[in-house]
Image (cartoon, rainbow, N blue to C red):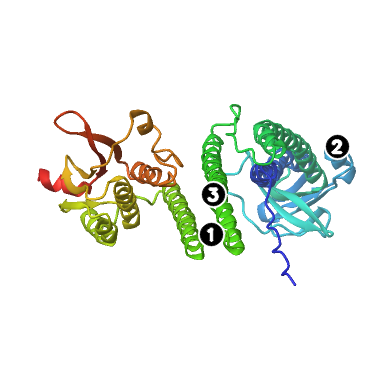
Amino acid sequence: MTGSAAPRKSVWSLRRLLLTGILLPVLALIALNAWSLYGQTLSSLHTAYDRTLLASAKSISEQIGVVGYDDEAQLRAIVPYSALEIFEADNQSRMFYRVSTLDGKLISGFSELPMWHGKIPQRPPYAALVDFYDAEFRGHPVRVAVLLQPVASASGRGMAVIQVAETLELRESLALQILRDTLIGQALLVLVVALIVIIVVQRATQPIRQLSHDLQERDQGDLSPLNAPEAPREIQPLLEATNHTMQRLRRLLNDQKRFVRDASHQLRTPLAVLKVQVQSAKRGDIPPALAFEEIDDTVDRATRVANQMLALAKVEQLRQQDSARPADSLSAFDEVVRDVALEISPLIAEHDLDFGMDTEPCPVPAHEWMLRELTRNLLHNAIRHTPHHGRLQISLKPEDGRALLCIEDSGSGIDEELAQRLFQPFSAGNAHSGSGLGLAICQEIVQTLGGQIELRNQHDAQGRICGLQARVQLPLKAADSDAAQD
C-alpha cells in the first residue's frame, strides 16, 4: 500500500500577488485618509456653523432689556422660539436657547438646558465674549455657544448669559455626504489601479505563458534551447540556466545512447562467437582443449571490451561532474607509473622486452584512477605492438609546468592516415589485437585533465621507422610554479 501524496502547497499567481501587494496598502491608506477626512470635515463644519450659533446668540441679545444697575439689575427677555427658526437649516437640526444672569437665574428659554459653568477663552475666536462646547440635551448631542452680553438701557445696566444649542444632525449628515462622495471617487481610483495592474501583469507575463505553452507542445525528448527574445530581462537568467541544464541533459542522453549503441555492437560479436564455440565444443567438432582455449580467448576479449567501455563511461561521468581535476587533492603521477609498470611486469617478462624506466616526482591535480587507467592503456598498447626481445622505455619528468610522460616502443610505428583516427572509439590498427578503445580512453582522460596526447614515429639513422612514441602532457600543481618563482 503506497502512502498518500503530500498535499500540494498553494502558490499564489503573479497577478494575485501584485494585486494584493498593491491594493491592500492602497485600501489601508484610503481608510486612514477617510477617517482623517471625516474628522477634518466635522471640524470645518463646526467652525462654519458656530458662526450661526453666535449670530443666533447676538440676535437674542437684542431682545433683552434691563432695569437697574449692576447687582440690582433686572433683566427682561421676550424671545419667541420662532425667532430661531431662521437659523435652522433643512429642518434637520433643532435649536434651543437659554438666557440667564451670571448667577444662573433663568430669564427666558429652556430651563432644562444646563447652565454654563465654564470660562471665556483668553483669545476667543470672535470679537465677543463667546465660548463653544459640546454637551447633551434631551438625549441628543448638541453644540452650544455661550455669549456674555453686556446689556444697557436708559434705566439700567447688567450682564446676560445667552446659551444657544444646536443638534448635530445637519453637521454629521454633511460630513457623511462629503465622506461618501470622497470614498466613491477613491473606490473608482482603486478599480482603475486594479484594472491597470491586471492589464500590465497580463502583458508582462505573456512571454512566460507562451514559453510554457511551447514547452508543453514540444515532442518528447526535444531538448533544444529555448528561444524567447521577448521575455523580460529578469527572466533571461532563468532561460540561460534552463538552456544550460537542457544542454547538459542532451549531452548526457547522447553519451548514454552512444554507450548503449557501442556496447550492443561490440559485445554482440564476441557473444555470438562464444555461443558458436560452445555449440561446436558440444558437438565435438574440435578437441576439448582447443575448444576451451578458443572460448577463453573470446571471454577475455569480451571482458576487456566491457571493462574499457565502463572505463570510458566513467571518464565521461567525471567530466560531466567537473570533478576530474580536484583542486584540493593531488596524485603522484610517478608513483602511479611505477605501480602500473610493476602490475604488468609479467607481460613484459613474457615478451622478453628490454625495459627501462626513468621517473621524477610529478604531482598532478587528478584522480589517481584516471592516471592509472591512462598509463595502463598506453603500456598495454605499447607491449602489444612491440615484438619479442624488443625495447620498451618509460620516462616521466616535469617540463615547463607540465608533467611529460613518454612511452617508446620498438614496433613498426603507424601510418599517417591511421594516426588521424586511432583516437576515435573502436578504431584499432589491428582488428584482431584490440578493441580500439584504449587510445580513445587515453584521449578522453587527457582532454578532461586539460592536457595533450600525440603519437610520433621514431626513426633510425637511415630514416626508417624504428618504433612509436606516445607523448602525454598534463598540467602540474599550480603551486609548484608559484613556489619556483619565489
Distance between the alpha carbons at the discs numbered 3 and 1:
30 Å
- With 280 as the anchor, is 109 left or right in this view? right
Of the pair 81 and 338, the residue shown nearer to us? 338
Q: Which structural element holds mark 1?
A: loop
Q: Which structural element holds mark 3?
A: helix
For the residue marked with disc 1, what is the amino acid?
Ile
Labels 3 and 1: the sequence-earlier one: 3
Q: Residue 474 falls in which quadrant of the image?
A: top left
Circle 3 crowding by C-alpha within 10 Å: few under 14, some 14–19, many from 20: some
Labels 2 and 1: the sequence-earlier one: 2
Task: Tell me where residue 109 appears, x and y as whole percent.
Answer: 83, 52
Labels 3 and 2: the sequence-earlier one: 2
Instruction: Tell me, for residue 263, which label it has, or none.
Output: 3
All told, the count of numbered labels is 3
Residue visible at 64% across and 38% down in the picture? 222
Residue visible at 85% across and 47% down in the picture? 94
Residue that mark 1 sits on: 286
Q: Residue 443 falls in which quadrant of the image?
A: top left
Of the pair 466 and 41, the residue shown nearer to us? 466
Instruction: Tell me, for residue 86, which label it has, or none.
Output: 2
Of the pair 441 and 294, the residue shown nearer to us? 294
Is residue 133 shown to the viewer in this render?
Answer: yes
Mark 3 or 1, which is nearer the eye? Answer: 1
Circle 2 crowding by C-alpha within 10 Å: few under 14, some 14–19, many from 20: few
For the residue marked with disc 2, what is the amino acid?
Ile
Task: Tell me where residue 241 appears, x and y as whole percent.
Answer: 52, 40
Mark 3 or 2, which is nearer the eye? Answer: 3
Q: Which structural element holds mark 2?
A: helix
Is residue 150 shown to the viewer in this render?
Answer: no
The N terminus lies in quadrant: bottom right
